[in-house]
Amino acid sequence: MKRAGFASRWLPILLLVPQLSIILVFFYWPAAYAVKSSFYLQDPFGFGQTFVGLENYSSLADSAEYLRVTNFTVVFTVLVTFFSLALALLLAVKADKVIRGAKSYRTLLMWVYAVAPPVAGYMGLILFNQRWGPLTELFGMFGWEFNLRADYFDTAFAMVVVSVWKQVPVNFIFFLSGLQSIPKSVREAALIDNRSASGRFWDVTFPLLAPTGFFLLIINITYALFDTFGVIDTLVKGEPANNPMTLVYKVYIDGFRGNDLGGSSAQSVVLMLLVLALTVFQFRMVEKRIHYT
Amino acid sequence: MAQVTLDSVRKIYPNGVEAVTPASFQIKDGEFVVLVGPSGCGKSTLLRMIAGLEDITEGALSIGDNVVNTLDPADRDIAMVFQNYALYPHMTVRKNIAYGLKNRKTPKDVIAQKVDEAAKMLNLTEYLDRKPAQLSGGQRQRVAMGRAIVRDPALFLFDEPLSNLDAKLRNQMRIEIKALQRRLGVTSIYVTHDQVEAMTMADRIIVLNGGRIEQIGTPSDIYHNPASTFVASFMGAPPMNLVAAEMQDGILSFAGLELPLASSMRGPVTLGLRPEDLIIDSHGPLAMEVELIEELGAHRLLHGQVNGQRLTVHLAKEEQVALGPLHLSCRVQNLCLFHPETGARMDGGFAFNLAQDRMEERV
Amino acid sequence: MADISLSTATPVIPRRRFLWSTLVDHAVLITGALIMFFPLLVMLQTASTPDIETMKYGPGLYFGDQLDDNFRKAMFEASGFSGANTGLSMFKNSLILGLGFAIGKIVIGMMAAYAIVYFRLRFATFAFWLIFTTLLLPLEVRILPSYEITQKLGLLNTYTGLIVPLIASATATFFFRQFFRSVPEELVEAARIDGAGPVKFFIDILVPLSQTMIAAMFIIMFVYGWNQYLWPTMITTDEGMYTLVRGIKRIVQVLQGGNEIPEYGRANVLAIIAVLPPVAIVIFFQSWFVKGLTESDK
Ligand SMILES: Nc1ncnc2c1ncn2[C@@H]1O[C@H](COP(=O)(O)OP(=O)(O)OP(=O)(O)O)[C@@H](O)[C@H]1O
Ligand SMILES: [Mg+2]
């Protein structure tokens, strides 16, 4: 709060009412509803529900399918996060270095930020088309019979590639602005102290980018977990069958398609806990200050 | 125009910090009062309570004849100039100056006329259509002044208005502000931690320390008759020399200096000597070891030790000195004695009365 | 007297050394840019060639002349069952979603942030936590119950149901709170002494000061809203309510094709149109957008 805040009583309440009422109805209510439903078994034909305690959770723990999806989600998240961060960092460092055309490069490398994930997935469908997709043909030249949606590994591969393609620009923007905010004096000091460019990068630039990188790590994990829904849904054409899928996708499939509200809610709650853990971890790390302010 | 009265005004922040201990004083109509003190001593807090930007925890504040404790800042008939000027960055100079009048439903033509007048007074006429970002620091400062004066307030409040300016501009603006205040005759309270500003601008100075008022007085009062070691060391550059001395059987002794005083005090005291009251005198009682000579053009400062205690001497430019031993005497009538622990003034004006016959002497 | 001679020869300025590393930098960047651009090129190419060719040979090297025709089909001819599902109507819905979301979020967020930052509120801390907890859980994890509740409220296939639940998070509020806190304290104090009340201060000072921030937020939020997929997929079953991005799901199913030739051209035109407005905004207002994006994390 500002030290000389206004003292009016009703005005701030009036200002807060829209925000508060929307989040109460569309955030707290659904969240509570999810927690509650996770303890109930929904009759598939809509005739009421019975309290089953933790049964929904225990059947999740026993489900081989759920384990498989969890495993895939973990691998998928790690790959997407790693590659989109690494490629973006490479591009940002180069874009920060070049003098000529820096602005054009920025534009050319960031516009994909605005592409919706399902559209990215759709582009993937075209590029990886079984018969004539340009990328399928490219892989064919190396003797790799690429088979989107028929082969588990190939589909997973396409999902990672498309998700990374879509995410690199965001990371690029952040890394570039992080690089540009490193004070000129610090760079010049490094230039005097260290003659090797890669030495300067790892000793000075990289540590100074750590706060940005850590922030992006969280952003990217969240992206891989949640925002890739559109990519996955289009790449499997809405019919996952035996194809890989992420936890969020499974929540949707089980709850919306399978009408298993209880099981789906239990999965939602597990996801919520996961996100909360991630946030706590984030705050912890920030406290340990990877911050140089 | 108005007088300002504080009656045991106290501030305790919600976090429990007592920023201002109960303070009482009165500022006369048209007076220019400077609040001075080190950083964090509560100057801004006191000023902001007067402005109404901060709640008063206890006590009564009146402007004119009315207690204004609960009045909104806008209703207190005050104007304020902030350290960072607080100009509205998206408004032109003209709009910045006019904003307060506009909110008070002043007719348009009156506003225009007042803004023009103020601009002329402050040499801002050619900048009226610029935005603050396109002005120099000094010009911004003037706009902030303009915003204050168009309103014809009963009271001007300044919170370190010059501290963002360079030294030269600061000197110039100091004179301009003082002259303007003289001309308008508006009661003013001015916060600064710069003792030169305080000395040169004030009709009266209020010295604050740790939320407490140490002394209220005219600049010359504060300088020559400091109420405590704090005031003595805060006002004046270089500050007053404070050395440990001894009272015994009506004799004050420090190094070779022995001075009879009509006082029954005994034991250790703190002796205060202004640098300009120390004089080079080959027969003087104080033996000083000069360690550093600071050349300041118009005069010089000698830094050294007497009996293991640091001392600074103010020297006219024509006097010749060299590093090494030297003898000093001092002007007795300007000595001050302080309590060695509390730092409070002890001689209280009586100290040297009985030595009247020796007043003019150097000892 | 010594002769002082001034050298008149032009000093030799050493020529900038040709650096292989600079070449590598450019090569990396150009490759990156091409990879980013390649899918769009393929889309454009197929959108301009007859579907039959695409079906037979896949994307080719040359652009065709069918773009006009496919554009007309995509925008004005109905697909789907109801006939309401033209590209134009989807475009309109996308626009409503993008604008409604961005404006709603900014207005509500600014109001809430103003209340939290500039007022002495007894329950300010409580309100703050209530609002900022929403940053923790994205819509995706509570998607089903949100759907159920929206259904209970009778908001399926309405713009309200489409937009309002998406607004139920505090990103904009958080952003404006950060910004308001960075506005110098003295500004509100000066304004109060100048006789401005809370409403006047907000309208005369704070909103004009926030202009750049509002613009940046607007761009980010518009793109975010326009690109929504999961929520619109669940909430809109009426084809007249489809957005372009939601329509992708339909397109994909069309491509499954039966025996007919899949309408690649038309589908790709729709995909391009779904991408174009947000991309254009991001490119044109690049500096605002980048500023808004990178400053929102602090
Ligand atoms: N809003 C606040 N809440 C709690 N304590 C405060 C607050 N504002 C100031 N203080 C404390 O009150 C004391 C006096 O602060 P004040 O701002 O009045 O000092 P000042 O004399 O103006 O210092 P400076 O010369 O640095 O401006 C300080 O110890 C400060 O830490
Ligand atoms: Mg202060």
Image (cartoon, grey):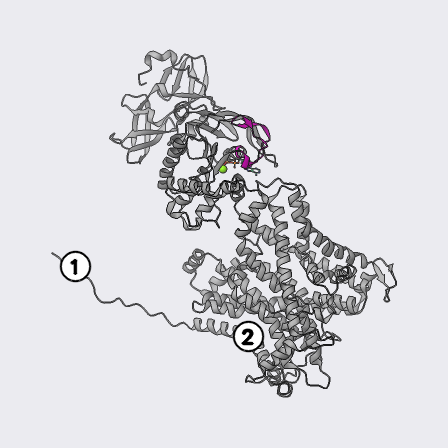
Q: Which residue is mark 2?
A: C37
Residue C28 among magenta residues: no
Of the two numbered discs 1 and 2 in the rendering, the one whose residue sits closer to the viewer: 2
How dense is the environment of label 2, judged by Cα within 10 Å: few (below 14), some, or many (20 and up)? some
- Asked if the residues shown at circle 1 and circle 2 are in contact, with their CB atoms under 8 angstroms apart, the answer is no
Question: Which span of residues is magenta-colored?
Answer: B50-76
**What residue appears at the point 69 percent right and 74 percent down from the top-left corner?**
C85
Q: Which residue is mark 1?
A: C4
Does residue B72 lie above or below A44 as drawn? Answer: above
Residue B51 among magenta residues: yes
Q: Is residue B318 in view from this perspective?
A: yes
Q: Are marks 1 and 2 on the same chain?
A: yes
Q: Can you give x and y, in whole percent of width and height, for residue B69 in the image? A: 58, 30
**What residue appears at the point 42 percent right and 73 percent down from the top-left corner?**
C20
Disc 1 versus disc 2: distance between alpha carbons? 63 Å
Q: Can you give x and y, in whole percent of width and height, for residue B158 in the image? A: 46, 36
Q: Chain of mark 2?
A: C
Q: Can you give x and y, in whole percent of width and height, for residue B89 in the image? A: 48, 49
Q: Quadrant of residue C247?
A: bottom right
